[in-house]
Image (tube, grey):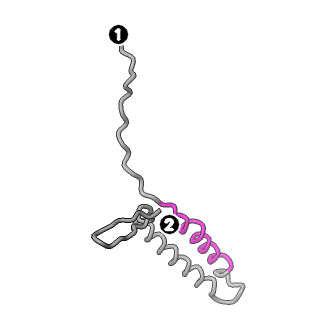
Amino acid sequence: MAKVYKKGKAKFKISPFGDYWNKINYYLLALGFVVLIIGFYLLSQGPWDNPVSLSIAPIVLLIAYLIIFPAAILYRKRKDKQPEQENVYRKDQG
């Protein structure tokens, strides 16, 4: 849910999607649209039995729909790992 912040008399909400989507997600989404347009352009070429329309265009469209768009939605930057704490319950040697 969006958090409501007050600044003076004005209230505004900050979108929770800002935490999930960053610049790389938008680049992947734009790449998906470009590949999608290329795929539909290839699909419209020549007569109906053109090899480009029948074989290459569906592969390009599948790449856009099944790889690039889900990657744009699901990609998330990894957070830095915190150093592991030492085990407090070590057995003493001796």
8 relative to 74 in the view: left or right: left
- The residue drawn where x is 36% and y is 13% is 93
| Principal secondary structure, stretch drawn in magenta | helix
Q: Which amino acid type is marked by label 2?
A: Ala
Q: Badge 1 is on which residue?
A: 94
Identify the residue shown where x is 62% and y is 87%: 45
3D distance between C-alphas at marks 1 and 2: 56 Å
Residue 9 in which image quadrant:
bottom left
Say left or right for 67 vs 9: right
Instruction: Quarter of the image for the C terminus: give it.
Output: top left
Q: Which residues are magenta?
A: 54-75
Q: Is residue 64 magenta?
A: yes
Place of residue 30 in the rendered image (x, y in percent of width and height, measured from the top left) = 47, 75
Answer above or below: position of 13 versus 54.
above
- Direction left: furthest residue: 8
* Vertical arrangement, residue 20 with respect to residue 42, above or below: above
Residue 67 higher or lower than 55, as above or below? above
Q: Residue at x 65, y 89 (%)?
A: 46
Which of the two residues, 53 or 17, is positioned nearer the viewer here? 17
- Which residue is at the front of the view, 57 or 18? 18
Mark identifier at residue 16: none
Q: Residues within 10 Å of mark 1 (few under 14, many from 20)?
A: few
Find out whether residue 19 is within the magenta segment.
no
Q: In the visual, does 39 lie left or right of 28?
A: right
Q: What SS does tag 2 mark?
A: helix
Q: Amino acid at mark 1?
A: Gly
Instruction: Please identify the residue farthest to the top as the structure is shown.
Output: 94
The residue identified by callout 2 is 72
Count numbered badges in the picture: 2
Q: Residue furthest front?
A: 9
Q: Residues within 10 Å of mark 2 (few under 14, many from 20)?
A: many
Picture residue at 36% right of the left edge, 30% below the top: 86
